[in-house]
Image (cartoon, rainbow, N blue to C red):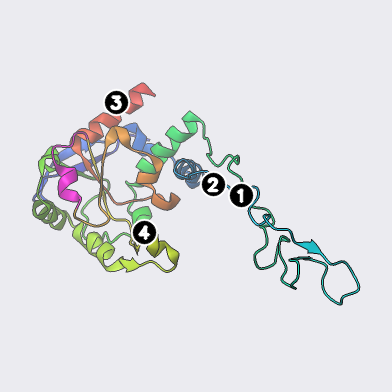
Amino acid sequence: MGEISCRVYNLEGKRVGRIRLPEVFKTSLRPDVIKRAVIALQSHRLQPQGRDVLAGKRTTAESWGTGFGMSRVPRLRDMRRAAFAPGIVGGRQTHPPVAQRKIEKKIPKKERRFAVYSAIAATASKELVTRRGHAVDDVPDFPLVVTEDIQGLRKTHDLKGVFINLGVWPDVYRVKESIKVRAGKGKMRGRRRKMAVGPLIVVSKDDGIAEAASNIPGVDVALVNDLNAELLAPGAHPGRLTIWTKSSIEELREWNRGS
């Protein structure tokens, strides 16, 4: 397979040159490896939890035995109310979770790195990006590479104009339309709203772009050296709509030399 290149665009959406893509964009697609890496990352955020070993057992309930025409579950004294046994109101859990359980999953370093490479290559496929659900009809090229000027934007209004010029704004609008109130008790636990995932901006240096993107729902900004499988493939689904800066592409070229 020969060298591959793509066009470079400025903030007005006009083509200003071409750039040769690094070898990482030739990595084969491995959804299974990406999924393993994403699950490993998600498991690191889980907090161990357990139950009190005496939960549901602080009672003097005893079984009445046979001959009363009732089940032989432990019952409180001087009343028919059952207690202690699992499966009854006020009883203990059958197999409660224990804090000693190991919930953090590990993945080999080379496999984790390959998952990131495969997820990076997936951002260059319009078919995968479309299959993931992004609105990309107006996006001019894949991967989408822009000049380093985008790193210095500090105003949300300016970044919105760049998204419109690059044809990315319809995907942001899709994210806005997807916002809804979560069903269930999660509303009371700090995660009241759900929404889709929007574009990812990969930069080599943050000169204010993270602040500009913080008010646009679904948009994430990441340094190229901080990329991981979950950022590039949220939910273990590869093909996230990604905007690369020209300098971040050059840094990816250094990855190939170091690996």
Residue 56: quadrant of the picture: bottom right
Disc 2 residue type (three-letter): Gln
Q: Is residue 68 above or below residue 62?
A: below
Q: Alpha-carbon distance for marks 4 and 1?
A: 23 Å
Q: Is residue 218 above or below residue 249?
A: below
Q: Alpha-carbon distance for marks 2 and 4?
A: 20 Å
Q: Alpha-carbon distance for marks 4 and 3?
A: 39 Å
Disc 3 residue type (three-letter): Glu
**The residue stretch that appears in magenta:** 204-214
Q: Which residue is mark 1?
A: 97
Q: Which residue is mark 2?
A: 49
Q: Is residue 3 left or right of residue 12?
A: right
Does the segment drawn in magenta span residue 191? Answer: no
Q: Is residue 87 left or right of residue 6?
A: right
Query: Most extreme residue toward the right, as rendered?
Result: 67
Q: Which residue is mark 3?
A: 254
Q: Mark 4 or mark 1, which has the lower sequence index?
A: 1
Does the segment drawn in magenta span residue 213? Answer: yes
Secondary structure at badge 4 equals loop
Q: Mark 2 or mark 1, which has the lower sequence index?
A: 2
Image location of residue 82, percent across then percent down: 73, 68
Mark 4 burial class by Cα count in 10 Å: few <14, some 14-19, many 20+: few
Q: Is residue 137 visible?
A: no
Disc 4 residue type (three-letter): Arg
Image location of residue 59, percent across then percent down: 70, 58
